[in-house]
Amino acid sequence: SIKSTALRCFLKKKSISSSSLSPFATPPSRRGAIQRHYVFLAHGWLGNELEMAYLETAIHKAVAAKEKCPSNIVVHKTKYNKEKTTDGIANGGARLVDEMIDFISAEISSTPLPADETKQEHDISISVVGNSLGGLYARFALSLLPSTLSCPCGRINIHLNIFCTTATPHLGVASHTYLPIPRVAEKLIGNGLAATGRDLFCLTEEENEESLIYQMATHVKYLHPLSKFRKRIAYANAFGTDFQVPTETASFLCRNSNFLHWHKLDREIKVHELSKVSGTNEDGADGGKTKHEENAFIAVILETEKLEAPPLVTPVVDDGSNTSKNDLSKEDKLILNMSTQLDSLGWTKVFVDVRDGIPAPSIRNPFSDKTDARERIRTTLLERHDSFGDIAIQSSHDIKEDEQKRDGMNEKCRKYGKGESLNKNDSCIGVEEITMKRRRTKYDKLPLPSSNCSPHPHSSSRTTYIPIESREVTELVTKSDRLHFPLGHTVMVVNSKNEWYSRINSRGQPVMNSLAEGLVRDIVEE
């Protein structure tokens, strides 16, 4: 079972970068101060550079609005793949890396880096935001991107900064279509969509040949450069609003995976969450936007821990089920492996709710209960936070004394889990409190967070973190109490590839504004 000591160490490490989007990724060593930050925006299937125009504008606004923000952030909407998105992921990725190198070289030539006679090399950073297919292009491009460039001013060292995808089919679309279809139909559709379609549907020439999608999610050639980014972020549309890229493949969730995702809750935010149900703020009065209401498009934000070594892939066995790894189909095993390997890199996953932004009416889902989908997420997470609430990190605590107390209480919890009684004044502390609900065996085989961590002075007793498995997340973010036209794919990124698209997708602007603000904050506060 997960030991409280390991969890506490994980939480201490987690707090090292509490203000950033993804604190699990360790910053790479710097040879010098970053002199210029490049942000590349990669469009998707049948798109063009205008597809990401709103995000570009939002980034510029975020830079202008931030105090003491450096002027060395350069944003570029890529265009080499315009009208060329059907010839496969590899070709698109190769063109993307060519454009990145060409743009950096041309931009440095036209606007030279600060001269320094004593410095023979310069340092720049690269961040990428890939939308839909553009995210796969970007992941492939990383395997071809050099670590240095040569220019008249000297050697240019490239540092990988932020990697973000929006509605990218990381697991492909085989077994991840909006409505389930047989494999025969997938093959017909994939072949009909040329080389890119065959890649997305994981079609290969030979039966036992690994698809490119699988290779990109499991081979070191592709995972290693992705792991070098300081942060990795994946935006996914929740609640069945994305026809092209459903939630599971956009956030590489797996119904057979028990990989831990972590949810952070500030106690003051919890008040906002509860008050939203009654329509009042934390003071009990109506009016005024709470933090939650300002980010009403966010269904939930979860994070996975960056692991030093790839985890062992262990499929979930439901309580009372006879399911074993051998019972999984070949396709399910491949998906499980891809999901686990990607999760182990350490990601921030932002699940977006654009149901109110879809320009079409919705109807009640006859196959769902009447519980609001967002309310179901809030209730589940708050109940679990109540169970794990006292694991909040307090830097003033003596670690050994606190752990001794925790272990003593957990021993009482174990006795209770075996049917023995507790004194009325006893309470359970830490992960073992899950036994109070007779669920201890549920967590027996979950991977332990790394114990390489230390206390941090900014840890707060008002903050708690709880684990939730990949399969549990899947259940929470894919089901909706209402049926909507699945138009969220273009709404989320305010796809502006033409004037008509720009108008119908305008309600997604808050999502991109938030992404831009977070991106600039992370670049500046590196």
Image (tube, grey):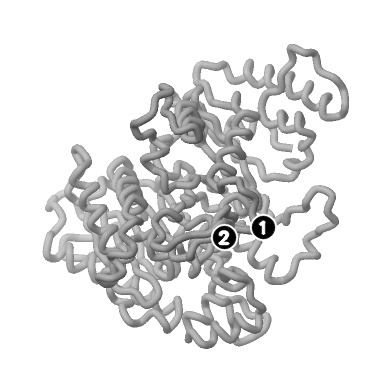
The residue tagged 2 is: 248
Residue 152: numbered disc: none
Instruction: Tell me: 50 left or right of 129.
Output: left
Residue 471 appears at what percent x and percent y?
Answer: 65, 52
Q: Helix or strand or loop: what does disc 1 sit on?
A: loop
Kindly identify the amino acid type of the residue bearing the numbered disc 2.
Glu
Residue 453 seen by the camera: yes
State which quadrant residue 21 falls in: top left
Which of the 4 image quarters holds residue 272? top left
Q: Which residue sits furthest right?
A: 419
Identify the residue shown where x is 68% and y is 54%. 312
Residue at 34% over, 31% down: 288
Q: Position of residue 437 (x, y in %)?
A: 76, 32
Q: Are marks 2 and 1 in contact (CB under 8 Å)?
A: yes
Which residue is at 53% across, 25% downward?
393
From the image, which quarter does the N terminus lie in?
top right
How crowded pointer 1 is (Cα within 10 Å; few <14, some 14-19, many 20+) is rated as some
Disc 2 crowd rating (10 Å Cα; few below 14, some 14-19, many 20+) is many
Could you say where residue 435 lies in the image, as x and y percent from the top left?
Answer: 76, 31
Residue 369 vs residue 167, the one in the foreground: 369
Q: Position of residue 140 (x, y in %)?
A: 44, 70
* Image disc number at residue 255: 1
Q: Earlier in the sequence, mark 2 or mark 1?
A: 2
At label 1, the amino acid type is Arg
